[in-house]
Image: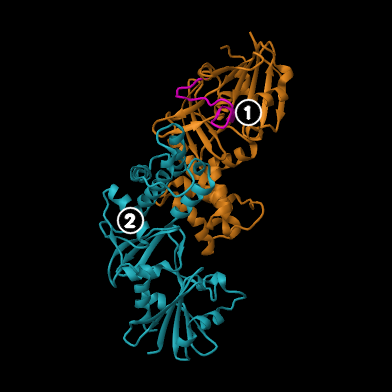
Chain colours: A cyan, B orange
Amino acid sequence: MAKRIVVDWGSSNFRAYRFGPAGEIAERHQAEAGILTVKDGAFEATLLREIGPWIDADTEILLSGMITSRNGWVETPYLDPPASIEGLAAAALERRASGGARLLFLPGICNRSPQPDVMRGEEIQVFGSVPAGDNALVVLPGTHSKWVQVTGGAITGFSTFLTGELFALLRQHSIIGRLIPPGPVAENAAAFRAGVALGFAGGARGLLNDVFTARAGALLGEFGPDEIAERLSGILIGHEIRAGLASATQAGQRLLLVGEAALLARYRFAMEGLGLSAETGPDHAAVEGFRRLGVLGR
Amino acid sequence: MAKRIVVDWGSSNFRAYRFGPAGEIAERHQAEAGILTVKDGAFEATLLREIGPWIDADTEILLSGMITSRNGWVETPYLDPPASIEGLAAAALERRASGGARLLFLPGICNRSPQPDVMRGEEIQVFGSVPAGDNALVVLPGTHSKWVQVTGGAITGFSTFLTGELFALLRQHSIIGRLIPPGPVAENAAAFRAGVALGFAGGARGLLNDVFTARAGALLGEFGPDEIAERLSGILIGHEIRAGLASATQAGQRLLLVGEAALLARYRFAMEGLGLSAETGPDHAAVEGFRRLGVLGR
């Protein structure tokens, strides 16, 4: 078997893993060499600068992340569900590095029905969280939260929610944000949970009205301006949880939270307030996913 | 009866109407002298500069708009529904100008149940659109769209939707906007109506996912990037219309669109695509509202 390297090459970061003969991660390298730092398409030169000593003509390099997007080295298509980790590796686009190494650019995954959706990178975390053959609804909270249905170890569908980005926009740029005191968000568990309950209830007036109540309630003295941010965050997360659960195609499956600890704690707290229970995925889901990818033949 | 003047004093504009003895508008004055242009609280000096010759000790001046907000001259409370135009005038806070004229600062209107909500200024357009004693669901599209329930000529409830502001934020600052070609929005009736249908359907995945589809669909080649803006606008307006109709407390009442012509055309087109019909309110609803206020005794 060829020497195998996996590179997780995003907008800001470059992370590489070299696999040993038993499929173990033998070496790691990380650098702030994301694709946005690469000038004039000098991707191969950057790769060699970062991990040149690992590479010879007999090396296979799997590349994942924004390096496979329109602004990256090689744009790969989106794979339709059901998408397994084996399918992901098999659909990679192959190129040769000038020294002869095989470059395998991984595809993204898309959803076409009921709504168009795309992911590029998060699937590695999903495959690193759910064992082969298993079922779960995997929740990856964040700027663009993903709720990913995994059935028999394959991604069978998913939905993206603009939760984190919308919170930031409303806080920084909207009329709602204008009433929020400057500085870090004042933690307020009760205000957050009240927002979650409002959003999760999915009242007839919907999100466009719910977010406005975070301003109006403060103007009417129902709560203080220091509660607006937490309430707003709760409203958006509550809407996401309701909609995410509705996206599940199987009842009663386990809910698996994957991501950065502080954000997971926030989602877990929101879910507990709604009487929902969720497991937490592995701490380093992406690394585990890359480990699985690293030992796959192709 | 005292001489009566009404001043619509907003953030950017100052508009004043002087009423004649028969209740007719005898004179108008407009200036870019909104409250944001007034330094050090010099509101009275600004008033006298703009319409001093209209004012003597026997004048009553009704003031409406942001001049009655926290950042204005005199902050007035919010009136609870049901709120009639007579109730609005009766709840005004009275002050005396240094020359003896009576200043009457009009209140805003609030909603406390089922959701906290506020308006300050739009109620004049509503009272200018619905004759005394009449019923209607008045729709004022805009940055913060208002759907106002009028029963027996009084405002009995309303909901605000962040539609226009959210569209601007998503277009200018979000990942969805990044794919939109720069320049004016390319008009595309089909894309707009597809968005309206999606938002109005209120699918289980909700607004946070619906807006993301406007990006994902373009990435998947389901439509061109030049359609994203119209689709996004449609999605938000579709959500607003569904939620606004749900806010109505009476079935089968007439829907009255009030506001600026181009925006009304957009909403009318959206509604027609949904099989809804709406009447259009008077062209100068605010002026008509002020005319009604101008002849009210107090």
Position of residue B229 measured from the top left corner of the image (x, y, whole percent): 58, 53
Q: Quadrant of residue B101?
A: top right
Q: Which residue is depicted at the point 74% across and 18% down?
A: B53
- Left or right? Give the position of A77 relative to B293: left
Boundaries of the magenta span: B66-84
At mark 2, the secondary structure is helix
Q: Quadrant of residue A235?
A: top left
Amino acid on which disc 2 is placed: Ala
Residue annotated with mark 1: B9
Image vertical order of residue A295 relative to residue B205, above or below = below
Q: Quadrant of the C terminus of chain A?
A: bottom left
Position of residue A139 measured from the top left corner of the image (x, y, whole percent): 35, 60
**How many numbered marks are there?**
2
Q: Nearer the viewer, residue B95 or A73?
A: B95
Residue annotated with mark 2: A265
At mark 1, the secondary structure is strand
Q: Quadrant of residue A90?
A: bottom left
- Give the chain of mark 2: A
- Give the chain of mark 1: B
- Left or right? Give the position of A122 relative to B134: left
